[in-house]
Amino acid sequence: MPPVPEATEPRGAPLPAAREGATAASAPLRRPLAEHPLPRFLAVGGIGFSVDAFVFSLAAAAGAADWLARAVSLAVATIVTWRLNRRFTFRPSGRRSEAEAMRYAGVALCAQALNYGLFLALRAVAPALWPVAALAASAGSAAGFSFAGQALVTFRPRGTTPMAAPPAGAGR
């Protein structure tokens, strides 16, 4: 397998050299946790949650119906998390900002649908389950899905294939 080319973080700090035998697709999974984008992704998610709750509260206090307040708060939170993840979490994809935003919104929408669907399913299957436990389980699952989707779809460098098979004869 060819070694991973040296890359830089969005802020310009060079990444440590990849381990021998790593591929471009597996490099993010082989870094030490402190250098992995997952902790930054989770921190951005926490900020997104705060923005979501704040905007929802403002809209609801202004008299908007819950469904409308929630739609507005999710849209604002999605824009905020896209900008923060683009700046702090993932390397540049090489795509135009508009194309990247649409990919981000698509993955986010799928993750939000998964979160909501899992929450409803858990509540239906286990009605005695504490609602916050169902919320935490569904949010955790959706966060994992979202991280993978954003890494492999939205911020994957342009012109690369996610999880590409190694060339024939590689590693022999």
Image: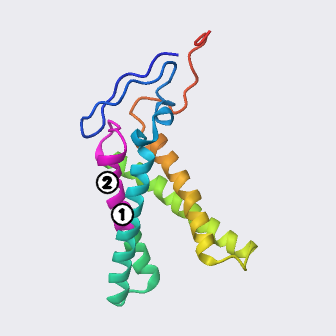
**Which residue is tagged 2?**
84
Query: Can you give x and y, in whole percent of width and height, for residue 139 in the image?
Result: 55, 63
Contact check, label 2 and label 1, Cβ < 8 Å: yes
Q: Which of these two is toward me, 95 or 22?
A: 22
Look at 53% across and 58% down and name the residue there: 111
Q: Amino acid at mark 2?
A: Leu
Q: Is residue 80 magenta?
A: yes
Callout 2 secondary element: helix
Q: Is residue 115 left or right of residue 63?
A: right
Q: Is residue 88 above or below residue 123?
A: above
Does the magenta segment cover residue 89?
yes
Q: Residue furthest left?
A: 12
Classify residue 129 as left or right of residue 51: right
Residue 127 image position (x, y, % from top left): 72, 79
The boundaries of the magenta stretch are 75-97
Disc 1 target residue: 47
What residue do we see at 65% from left, 72% from top?
120
Sequence order check, earlier mark of 2 and 1: 1
The x and y percentages for residue 35 are 39, 39
Please name the predominant secondary structure of the magenta segment in the image. Answer: helix
Amino acid type, label 1 = Ile
Quadrant in the picture for residue 52: bottom left
Give coordinates of residue 23: x percent, y percent: 50, 24
Q: Quadrant of the C terminus?
A: top right
Q: For mark 1, does the 10 Å Cα neighbourhood hold few (<14), some (14 to 19), or many (20 or more) residues? A: some
Pair 2/1: label in front: 1
